[in-house]
Amino acid sequence: MKLLKLVWQNLVRNRKNLMFSSIGLVVGVSTFVFFVALGEGVRTVVLERIFIIKQIEVVPRSFDLAVTQASVARLDSRAVDELANIDGVVGVYPKMKFTFPAWATGGKAILGKNFRAEVIADGVPPEIVRDELEFGDEFRDWEAEFSCEGEGIGEVVGCPEGRRCLDGRCEKMPCNPQVAEQFNPCTGLTYCAEDTRMCEMPIPAIANPQLLAVYNSSLTTALSSGEGAQLPKLTEDAIVGFTFEVMLGKSYLGESAQGEPITRRVRAVGFSSKAISVGFTIPIQYVKRFNARFTGEEMRDEYHSVILVARNNDAVAGITLAVKAAGYELDSKHAQAERLGLVITIVTLIFTMISLLIVTVSAINIAHTFLMIIAERRREIGILRAVGASRGDIRVMILGEATLLGLVGGVLGITVGAAAAALVDYLSARYVPDFPFKPESFFIFDGSLLLIALFAAVAFCLIGAYVPATRAANMEPARAFTTQ
Amino acid sequence: MNSEVVKIRGLNKWYGRGKARNHVLKGVSLDIRKGEIVSINGTSGSGKTTLLNIIGGLDRVFEGKVEVDGRDLLALSDRKLSHLRNETMGFVFQAFNLLPHITCVENVMVPAYFSSRGMSKAHQRAEALLEMVGLSDKTNEHPTELSGGQRQRVSIARALFNRPSIILCDEPTGSLDQSTGRQILSLFHTLNEDDGITIILVTHDNSVSDRCSRVIRIEDGVIKSDKTQELRRFDPGEVESHPDLT
């Protein structure tokens, strides 16, 4: 510590020389910090928002049969239990798609006009998304049995809207779809269904944020061209509460093999990354019933995919192997995600190597500068030795100067790197058009990254100064006074 | 009887290699006792500065035995030798060898950075030493702002910082005018008389040798003569008095 003052004095005294030689250090550290933060930021967006790699979607293994594909292993309840027991799996949720045609109409309230479209939908267990939704309680199977107490209607007796309590059970209230709504007993969100002539709760539905991102960035442009009003950009808040009608069992493509088509109202209750990418997702109990109705009872227990949630990214590889060994496959998105993640890692590595190369060259430059400084300070080193400095003291002083230089250079490099990143984010926000999943920042500055950068800066300075420090320490004091 | 602070036996020193090898010191043996003011005289290239450097532990490439304060210099590790220099010896050079980028008081304090003692009273001691050598008003000035005599006094103050028992001086008055040189010598006399410090001077100036208690003459690496003489201190009128020197 006593020598620290001398070290600081020497650093300040030689600041011009050292400043020039440390430019390479600052450039190298800032490049390293910039590209590693960029790589981490892009990886996070790609692997946690676009392709959520910790969520592995398992599908039945299939093979091509000339004109069609056939599945070998079914994904049923037994399969779900088997997958849940794989080491590293912390969550399992099966998904079931509609196995019958359906189409939807509606949209005037938020889009300005009604649209009609084929429906792609699936179901998930409500409990796995409930915590993600602001109105999570609404995402449930409203057809389930509800118990109640007393006599009355609705929440007063513990029943959902549009139901009355009879003998401890909530029963739907009958209604007449031919009369106006105000004359029907269907209260709150319930409506009078034509086929059941009962007050029905709308089927709760969630959508994937990806769908909203695609709509806002691409569909608004594509569908707004030509005559007519522009489609508005939408937010999640604007869509929650939106209702539309869905015809189940029939669409433009045809009718289901069995069961009369029915119309149901669907109500958006939120967004989740676990929802189907294109379409909407409803509680799986509804899908089971509809599949059984329109396709056959055996479809009640046939899942189309199962999402496994991994404990962490490191567990994914092991889970993948276990899934394949069990006779299942992974959805193609997962392979894409892995490849993309690998590309990002390789590119980040390349830029990291380049920045390390810059820092290495800088270390050589620093070595040269220190050699030059020590040559100039021969007499001074001789004086210090004469008054009692040992070889170790001289070495510590020189290396101390290098350490301080590394710290200063490292901090400057980190600052420059962070400033460059901030500039990129600013320019991106200002000039780059919106695209799906455009992040607010392309960079993630982890505390460990900054520590590594600082450590690297100090380490390379010490490496550069080691030979000069040793040379200074081994200088014979007597010769220092005789040679100038 | 005074004990020996320096004991040299069979000292040989060479510079260079092969055909260019130069035998600078040839079997030198001598003892220096505590409290002596010794002048080592000789012409340029006689080996006197080399001898001084070896006694001071600044040159460790030699044959023979050199003991300072009872310790064999070749047997000591670098750290122990450095510690010995720090605690036991002080150096005064012809070129002063002050650090120009720090102030006078900081120059005097430099030995404290390598001492086993703490730094808490170092500044205070340095100021006291500057006062002792008559430079209390130059504490915060840089050496470049001082005259030659003043710089040499700062150098002496630095040499005294750790209360050494030996001061080694290489041509201490070589860069000074006669009057200033007498002031410096007078200071050495005072240190020798008051504190019993042994002073070893290398000089080619006979007027300096005349003011020492012992004169050792070296020629061509060999001691030619070694005479003890009466120490002639300066009369008050011989030295231009400085108000702070008493």
Image (cartoon, coloured by chain):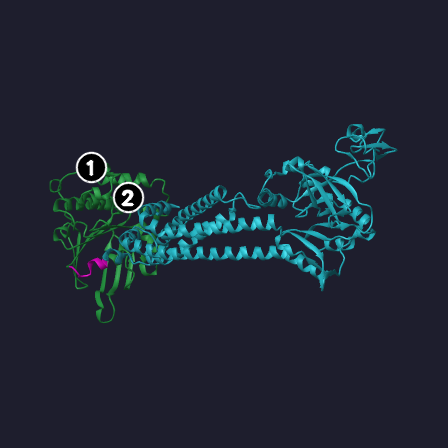
Chain colours: A cyan, B green
Query: Left or right: where does residue B21 sit relative to residue A170?
Result: left
Q: Vertically, is A184 above or below A377?
A: above
Is residue A205 at least partly visible in the picture? yes
Q: Which residue is mark 2?
A: B102
Nearer-the-camera pick, A400 or B34: A400
**Quadrant in which the C terminus of chain A is drawn:** bottom left
Q: Nearest to the eye among marks 1 and 2: give it.
A: 2
Residue A365, given in percent of the width and then of the height, sits at 35, 56
Give the farthest residue toward the bottom.
B19
The label on residue A239 is: none
Residue A256, given in percent of the width and then of the height, sits at 79, 50
Query: Left or right: where does residue A76 sit relative to residue A398?
Result: right
Q: Disc 1 residue type?
A: Asp
Q: Magenta stretch?
A: B44-51
- What element does badge 2 sit on? loop
Subunit ID for the residue under disc 2:
B
Q: Which residue is mark 1?
A: B244
Query: Left or right: where does residue A437 sit relative to residue A83?
Result: left
